[in-house]
Amino acid sequence: MITGKEIHNLARRLWRINRSITGDGNRLTLDILKEICPEMKIYEVPSGTKVFDWTVPNEWNVKEAWIKDPSGNKIVDFEECNLHLVGYSIPVHKTINLKQLQNHLHSRPDLPSAIPYVTSYYNHYWGFCLSDLQRRSLCKGEYEVYVDSELKNGSLTYGEILLEGESKQEIFLSTYICHPSMANNELSGMTVTAYIAKWLASLKQRQYSYRIIFIPETIGSLTYLNKNLKKMKDNIIAGFNVSCVGDDRMYSYLPSRSGNSLADQVAKHTLKFTSPDYRTFLWNDRGSDERQYCAPGIDLPVVNMARTKSKEYPEYHTSLDDLDNVVTPTGLHGGFKMIYKAIKSIESNCYPQASVLGEPNLGSRGLYPTLGATKKIDSVHTLKNILTYSDGKTSLLEIAEKCDVFILDLLPTIKILKERNLLTIHNSPVFNFPNSINMPEAP
Amino acid sequence: MITGKEIHNLARRLWRINRSITGDGNRLTLDILKEICPEMKIYEVPSGTKVFDWTVPNEWNVKEAWIKDPSGNKIVDFEECNLHLVGYSIPVHKTINLKQLQNHLHSRPDLPSAIPYVTSYYNHYWGFCLSDLQRRSLCKGEYEVYVDSELKNGSLTYGEILLEGESKQEIFLSTYICHPSMANNELSGMTVTAYIAKWLASLKQRQYSYRIIFIPETIGSLTYLNKNLKKMKDNIIAGFNVSCVGDDRMYSYLPSRSGNSLADQVAKHTLKFTSPDYRTFLWNDRGSDERQYCAPGIDLPVVNMARTKSKEYPEYHTSLDDLDNVVTPTGLHGGFKMIYKAIKSIESNCYPQASVLGEPNLGSRGLYPTLGATKKIDSVHTLKNILTYSDGKTSLLEIAEKCDVFILDLLPTIKILKERNLLTIHNSPVFNFPNSINMPEAP
Amino acid sequence: MITGKEIHNLARRLWRINRSITGDGNRLTLDILKEICPEMKIYEVPSGTKVFDWTVPNEWNVKEAWIKDPSGNKIVDFEECNLHLVGYSIPVHKTINLKQLQNHLHSRPDLPSAIPYVTSYYNHYWGFCLSDLQRRSLCKGEYEVYVDSELKNGSLTYGEILLEGESKQEIFLSTYICHPSMANNELSGMTVTAYIAKWLASLKQRQYSYRIIFIPETIGSLTYLNKNLKKMKDNIIAGFNVSCVGDDRMYSYLPSRSGNSLADQVAKHTLKFTSPDYRTFLWNDRGSDERQYCAPGIDLPVVNMARTKSKEYPEYHTSLDDLDNVVTPTGLHGGFKMIYKAIKSIESNCYPQASVLGEPNLGSRGLYPTLGATKKIDSVHTLKNILTYSDGKTSLLEIAEKCDVFILDLLPTIKILKERNLLTIHNSPVFNFPNSINMPEAP
């Protein structure tokens, strides 16, 4: 049984690692995640590799970075918080006055105690981030700035888990590993996804195959797509970009670009029955790797199911997005269950077909009170509703919508109907491969 | 001219007959209905006949049934009200104490003065129904119970009326004859249907053929389907399950399973213009023989047009569903007119096509005031609306919706336009068989 | 730069001309309009020509028409206001008493100061129109009535402007020239259309060809259709009936009969972003030449974009519909801009297709702030939205709707994306003829 505490502990362990779009922090992160799901393979893509319109950049690593005030005190230190250093800062060591320093400082006047998250991946620059409170307290004088970073030919690192199922058709999960110490908009995605992978790997039977990747955002998803596009377009029937799944505030859904894929149907169905007050965003609100997966010509059926989405909470992209006040064990467990239920809904989907013409004689099978009376029996009502919609062309997901019942709650009745030979179950409306319905065990 | 009083009198005559899914009461009922429509043929299907998942049961007949109290008084007597005996009760004659008797009694604490309607078709059992008021007054002591019923090899009885029209395509009406003394949920359906059949049989010309059946619910409709399925699937273009059409409270519509058949369109159009505050139920609210007619693989376009639907009124399935307080002459006449107008709407439906390009010169034909002025003439407005939509591909039913006028109210204008050679009328959008529009006379 | 004052001055110049469905007033009107757009060709169609269900009538011209009161004073004089004479009045000269005169008088008791507009094109008749105030003041006695009109074999006159574009596909504009001195429901249409034609003729490049006609209503549009139907059906992709485009009260849209043509999409899109409180009428509210253009079998995609539509304002079809209180320079300019923007929207429509897979590297092209931060940049947001929807199958009009931005406001961004080779532009979703996007200059 996977608990929220367990996921939260994993996030805590990964907290201080300095992740970026490349670098040793990413390798360390993946090594730790591989402990949870040993099926993971780790890949390196060399700097300079062309990926669509982009090029894999030089690898960035940092040894040390700080600012000393006119009195020689370290007032900003990468060692203390890796958000202090602008991502991909070039090396520097000099003494400058406050005015010159200000050109390299970043803070958030609207959030005076927060250290903001800033990067400069593709433009040579160095800079520091600090709280606006601290920035305002800086006095005139000479400051020593020191960045001992390295930008050199290396590689971009990502992790991939492939799990085979009965069908070649794939369910796709993607999460990113490129932000330093932030909780909801970083650690929640990779930790929840790791535990989902662990659960999936533990199943004795999977209807579908699974492709689960841990990549840096944008350049990483593009790199992965560049390498795997044909296979992905051929096989993926539903995908989820897993991000911001760790806080307690809301549940939310952001559609794929087409808006009507199986992933969209499942996401809406799952949230409607498990978190009815979930928020629906528009494709125009997108912000994460769905931008690549659903781009024209790529056209994968990828949605976002999240707790509080990026940009929708005040702590977003700052040091306030932490494991104490924003991301919690219950928040992570809620995120886990959401993805878990969506996957289970797809695994359980099928095309049932009634075996007899007209209503079957339920009484003779002990499925109906034999004494006709006026009271409505709810379970019989659901059973009869399933049968009336089981025409072999309507998916169980659609039937669940028509019955106004969560698909997973129909499974016990489906099992009974199948055992009594009242239903046959098909995996597709064209009935190519007869197959037993697969009900994944609960984690 | 068919009156509500006439229909009500027929219901009164049928009231006391002990109907069930088989038995002499059904034969007697059909014999009386055949007086109204002599075109009816009566069929017997032997006990033991397999029908889909079911078997036609033994035939049930009752001579006598009563309970005597400890003083020897008949306190419950089938002779007085046939609802007192549980349907398909097996024979019994014994003396038992009150506690033992209670296991065989049925009452409705929520409706203390009502005798409920209970059956046990497929499970050997005997029992009595009585008002909860009477049940509460029973004192301790020994009770004599007597059921002189017979359950033996016999047959299931049903009536069928086939009326030929110009087309082989059929309109289908089904009503049931299996409930004992209840008015809305029994007699209203068969009496209104009998008078609809009488009206249809009297017409000199029918566009469509008619299949009208009087059958016991469930086992009867399944038996009929089992015997006639291919013909029905080939020919029926619209069907109505006629039930609960006799009270004065509401008008209602319950869709076919597909929800978009011609029957659905006509039912909604008719009720919208004749009873705009009608209630719409969902397929999930179904309860009568539409369950069989619309089952997967049977897939007939059958809807319910009712007054107050089964289960929606407090007297449902009790002795309170009577011909005095629930079903009235005006209620029955309203039910008759509703079905009559729906059928007339289908008979009147056609595909009109404007004969001239552009608007015709209405003034030269005396159809337009020759002095152009500012006042809008409504009848001309409707006439021009019909012409503008008459493209040969839009049905008159759709045109009526676009004009926001009841289809039957368009017929006088259609007649004028046809006489002036401004419209040609087709029976289908593919123009296979030119035909005059048929306007059934009013009853 | 075309101003409202300029259009209003043209209307003022055309005010006093006695227009009808035929006659010298129409020729004079067209001659003046031809000064604005010399591309106009003027056609004459002889009386007696059969056009669909109609016949071009005799030509009507008037020299003089008046009523003298018992004292010999001219109290009603065509010379003063051409609305005083019923259109197509036959010649008459006699002296009659007041009672006999009343049979030939028309007034509006509900608008006592207005002279109504009345015609009798196809019925031999003579009559006068006057204010109800004046009519009530008439005293008993003998009145001399004089109509010196001529109804003889002649012709129906119309103007046509054809402007060639890069494509043979046409945008169609129709306006009518058959009402005498009325402003919104006559002069606004022809004057705005003339200036639209002038603007279109001045363009160096037009994506589409233009067919712009000035015809009498009904008989004129039918005559034109009769002559040009095949070409029109082959080429017209969007059409606008231009009428009532000169007052300041509302903006409105009346759909084509199909309701979903390109013209409908453009009209709704344009009004939604330029006059969000515009009114939508129904096809059942139609009243002008769209009746012919959208008739069954003609089926052209013609909509109405109007200011206050015919029949929707109190002065309609009376002398109160004037150039002082109803139609104004600002009203006309608003009408002009509405049609201008709709046309420009069609000219700008195209099928953009993203040139790279996945999101392009905007930073490397200077299109993105290189320092990733938390602030949302709106112009970048729109740029990315355009790219994400540019799949080659979605029109720019649809993309504009998805972005919730007026199509013309997307053009600067489209231009940038095209210049940076991030988009290719197609004129149709099947990519037959590559072409540069055409952005007509502002007038």
Image: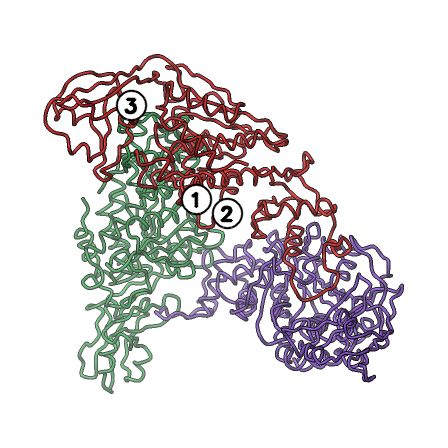
Chain colours: A red, B purple, C green
User: Is residue B45 in sight in this rendering?
Assistant: yes
Name the residue rendered at 22%, 43% in the picture: C443
- Residue C46 pos. (x, y %): 37, 55
Residue picked out by circle 1: A251
Residue picked out by circle 2: A274
- As helix, strand or loop, the secondary structure at mark 1 comes to loop
- As helix, strand or loop, the secondary structure at mark 3 comes to loop
Tag 2 and tag 1 share a subunit = yes
Q: Is residue C269 left or right of residue B63?
A: left
Q: Between marks 2 and 1, how big is the CA–CA gap?
A: 10 Å
Nearer the observer, C91 or A173: A173
Of callouts 2 and 1, the N-terminal one? 1
Q: Residue furthest right?
A: B153
Residue picked out by circle 3: A79
Q: Quadrant of the N terminus of chain C?
A: top left
Asked whether the beta carbons under mark 2 and mark 1 sit within 8 Å of each other, the answer is yes
- Residue C134 pos. (x, y %): 22, 78
Task: Sort mark 3 into few (<14), some (14-19) or many (20+) by Cα contacts within 10 Å.
Answer: some
- Residue A372 pos. (x, y %): 72, 64
Of callouts 1 and 3, the N-terminal one? 3
